[in-house]
Image (tube, rainbow, N blue to C red):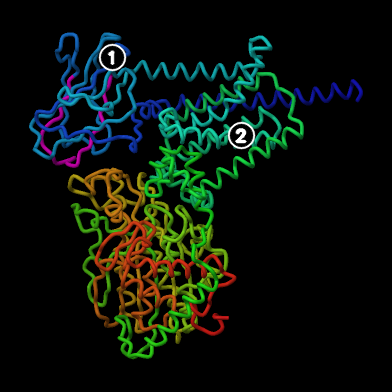
Amino acid sequence: MSETVKNKHVKKKNSAVLLLKTVITAVLLFFTWYLCSHFMEYQKNATNQVNKYRIDQVCQLSAGSAVSQKFVAKHTHLKTVKVYFGNDYSGQASGKVILNIIDLETGKSIQRLTKNISDIVNNDYTEFKTNLQLTKKKEYSIQLTTSGAESGKEPLIFQWTTKETGFRGKLKINQEEQGKYLVSKLYYPVTIYQQWAGICMMMALVLLLLWFALPAPEMVKKALGQILFFAAPLFTFWFVERFTDNPIFRMRAAEFWLNILVYYMFFGLLYLIFNSRRVSVTIGSILWCIIGIANYYVLSFKGAPIVPSDIMSARTAANVAENYTYSIQPVFVWNVLFLLLYLAIMWRCPVPKKMGWKKRVIMLIVIGLLGSVLGHFVVEQKTLKNFGIKNNVWDQKKGYAKNGLFFGFVLNMNSLVQEKPSDYSVEAAKDIAEKYEEKFANEDSDKKKKGRLETADGTKPNVIGIMNEAFSDLSVINEFSTNEDYMPFIHSLKKNTIKGSLYMSIFGSGTCNSEFEYLTGNSMSFLQNGIIAYTQVVKDKLPNMTYLLKEQGYKGNLALHPYLASGWNRVQVYDYMGFDHFYSETDFKNPTMYRKYISDESDFKKIEELYENRTEKDEPFYLFNVTMQNHGGFDKTYSNFHNDIQITDNHKNEQAEQYLSLVKKTDDAFKQLVEYFSKVKEPTIIVMYGDHQPAVQSSFYDSLFGKSAGSLTNEELMNKYRTPFIIWANYDIKEKTIDKMSANYLSAYVMNEAGLETSPYQKFLLKLRKKLPVLTAMGCFDKKGKYYESALESPYSDMVKEYQILQYNNLIDTKHTVNSFFYLSDEQKK
């Protein structure tokens, strides 16, 4: 290569580097400007942060009790003291909370502030504006007492392991020291400006390192480069856990080192791919920074951290993400700055020679072996459990706090592998099918009892199924008062109605799993925790209610969902399920919108329109509808929606009020739908049920239960998995109230009671329902109401194992499905 060509090449490279530096500088300056313009929001979040999953209730602030927390003044001006309270009687309790700042040198109170107990918000910070001048580095104490409070209605005090800067010693109750610190924040105005100065200084360092060389000897830079490269996985682990206030050095040794292992394996793979220390560390750390922020928001909005199934359903999540409120958190700012400074220094250190292919092969083999061994133990589970390491399927947020984000995610990878039942074989499935087919054939020869939904003349009724998004009656957890009934029509509905409680396998999200259980009769209890059925399991034609109705002459066979068709892979799945047409949001013209979603009013009018426009009017009509109106994201206000329902007792919560106001709209819309079909001559059944309870603030549920979620037994938690179901007919039926049923039985129940032909699989389900009326991923209830955490632990485990084998045969081992057991017609049985 000639000198001229070399010079041109160097010039191009220098120009590219200059352009890249300029772009990075512009981005960093924009970042700084953004922080400046949102300074007040940053300031608020800096003093409001609390990880509600790490706090513990310590005492009720009853008469005669004094709670104190010693602190050393960091600065002279103490502007605000914030204390985190629980208050089940917000808005109605009498009495006052008194906050004294005590000078420990004199023992005297230097400031006394009061708050009405009725003004203290439940499960949130209450602000006491002190504006007090202190002596720097001098010891003081925060003392909390009450005056005139009603017995049993005093606010609650909380403690946690997080030590506010300046605190000395643990929380005391009547001078008796407790194990943790008061959940409180001290706000000195100067500290915010100090943080701001620190941010500016770090940003300036990053910019200086971007444009100028590191001022250090070459040997020092080489050593520093080595340290930064090998410490990158540990550094990444540290800042990722900071996003959720989960200090890594408080972890048990086993979980700590397993996280270190997976992070080193991850960065090792990146190093193998790029064969560049700088590039692998940069890509890896930035990727984990993004994941850490994403996990923070998922945890905030959904109440659970990121699990593998969230990746599979990322497209659906992105569709609704804009409906949540996002805010700058101080930890985001500092983590990003630490990362930028780390990378800036590393890029200024000398680069060693790239690895040769032999070293790369050895490294690949080592990573492969470590991955295989770790994968074996994760799947096998028993060995890890012997060391106290397990996946907390009941409470993933607690599991991730213990296991760390990365290793917690790895433990959940188990959910991507559908484990075959230990007794499964095609022959076993055939034997079970033959046994029950013979038994049902003999039973069918006997006189069959007339179903509650059968028409007088045996005409097949139209069947309209509605899975209503987040539709539930939260009073099943505990009674609460509202300014008006939020479900007046449904509560009053008795004539020609079957009603009851339906137990689901999900809470707050995962809609398609409830849809899957209802339509197929399969149970999420036999699938790995965290599975999203439609995106991870349904890969082929699947026996379900739609095929069974089509086999009996039903027409229409429509699916309706007033939102994006792409959500939960429904376009493909509905094809597998035999629906003839799928209508989505693009098929609505000028619908009424509540918040950002099509209303149930417009959705139900679409049902009426599709019914009226059916072409084969001499045949029974079938439609399945999934609504959208009540979808989560209850923390925003909207110009097109007002919270008409107000909670009037101590359970008051704005998010819950928005949700209940939406439920009232659903009730109004359902009333209109029932009135419409009351005038229809053709016999019609409408089945409506909720897919899960809403993900409103956890503090509201804590208030209803009377204790935090972490204190609930598994049986008590089942109340968070209850939704109502209503089966209404426009002809005379025998009314009934069903106390307990799970979603996997509902479609078989409806078809059987309507006098329609049911498949042997549905007959099997109805037989099992008599023994275990509730069977969900969260546990089961037997016919006597006894709770079991797993159906396989119940007295009916033999039949449950048969159910598991039959489900695996129709859902997973689709090449060998025993079709005669799941379909009716000879054509489908082939």
* Helix, strand or loop under label 1: strand
Mark 2 or 1: in front is 2
| Quadrant of the rendered image containing residue 331 | top left
Name above or below for residue 85 compared with residue 773. above
* Helix, strand or loop under label 2: helix
Q: Which residue is drawn at 51% across and 57% down?
A: 567
Identify the residue position indicated by label 2 in the image. 267
Q: What's the mark number on residue 699? A: none
Q: Give the amino acid type for the residue marked by disc 1 in the picture.
A: Val
**Quadrant location of the C terminus?**
bottom right
Is residue 89 inside the magenta stretch? Answer: yes
Q: What's the mark number on residue 72? A: 1
Q: Give the amino acid type for the residue marked by disc 2 in the picture.
A: Phe
Q: Which residue is drawn at 33% across and 75% down?
A: 676
Q: Are marks 2 and 1 in contact (CB under 8 Å)?
A: no
Q: Which residue is drawn at 9% across and 31% down?
A: 63
Residue 559: percent from left, percent from top: 48, 69
Name above or below for residue 802 compared with residue 458. above
Left or right of 172, for residue 35:
right
